Image (cartoon, helix red, strand yellow):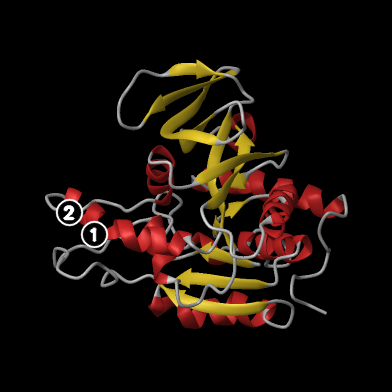
Amino acid sequence: MDLLILAAGMGSRFGGLKQIEPFDERNNFIIDYSIYDAKKAGFDRVVFLIKEENREIFEETVGSRVAPYIEVAYAYQKLDVIPEGYNLPADRVKPLGTAQAILCAKDQLKDNFAIINSDDFYGADAFEVAAKYLSSLPKGSKGKYANIAYYAANTMTKNGSVKRGVLHCGKDGKLTSLVESKLEWRGEEIYAAPLEGGEMVAIPQDSLVSMNMFAFSLDILDKIEENYAPFMEANKNDLASCEYLIPTLVSELIERGEVSCEVLSTSAVWYGVTYREDKPEVVASLAKLVEKGCYPKDRFGKK
């Protein structure tokens, strides 16, 4: 099984390149914890999706250290990976979104795969859930996807609002819709509002939300490619800022009856640095997990 780590973005609100920010006294990064958990769960290959200009620093700080323990490959997110006949504004520098990012890694993905963000801590249980799902797929499966869903209360920060995909499921446990929303604590309650407009309303703390951790059969690459030109055409007047996003595409494919997406809950607690003020709490939480024996006390990648 492959793990695709989306690591091409800069952490603008955090104020730096979060992917190579140390988060413990042994100079491990959040990405190290993810790779450790993934390998333990059964993933045997990791593909880093990065900016080409960051290849050297990624290889020096992460890739070379984990390469002895898990197969490593690199792919580059580039703005010129677009359908024929379309051109982006010359001054656009913002990446084209997560669906385009996955497509940029097409030549490196060899097996059914999961995707994660590089700067989020997902927790061991989430990788176990994803690995169990992918390993259960019959060879050659198509249109079989899953979202590893978190309880909303396990994904929040006290330092501001967060963006989460609020998941809606049918009685069969399959995804019917994913609504990108802004979530925030108000006292002891979580309030959410759709990003496309709508009032803030209280939601249960155990509402299932997406942290952009999906598990895909390999045919998602074809689906992304097939729907790319229609996306560009629909957004031809907004090519300076539009984003081709994987949650939106999956939702559209479900609506058209082309694929199914299981919603698989995890008991894992998310840790992340949406804001720089989040870092001390994340560092303390990871230290507690190390003390409990969940992670080694030595630097990751060290024999």
Residue to which mark 1 is pinned:
229
Q: Position of residue 71 (x, y in %)?
A: 66, 79
Secondary structure found at label 1: helix
Residue at (53%, 76%) from the top-left corner? Answer: 58
Q: Is residue 250 above or below residue 190?
A: below
Question: How busy is the neighbourhood of tag 2: few (under 14 within 10 Å), some, or many (20 plus)?
Answer: few
Q: Is residue 235 visible in the rendered structure shown here? A: no
Query: In which quadrant is the C terminus drawn?
Result: bottom right
Query: In which quadrant is the N terminus drawn?
Result: bottom right
Q: Is residue 133 visible in the rendered structure shown here? A: yes
Residue at (59%, 37%) from the top-left corner? Answer: 155
Q: Position of residue 35 (x, y in %)?
A: 67, 65
Near-viewer residue (40 or 59): 40
Marks 2,1: beta carbons within 8 A = yes
Near-viewer residue (15 or 73): 73
Q: Position of residue 138 (x, y in %)?
A: 67, 60
Residue type (three-letter) at the residue carrying disc 1: Ala
Distance from the alpha carbon under mark 2 to that under mark 1 = 6 Å
Residue to which mark 2 is pinned:
233
Determine which quarter of the picture holds residue 197. top left
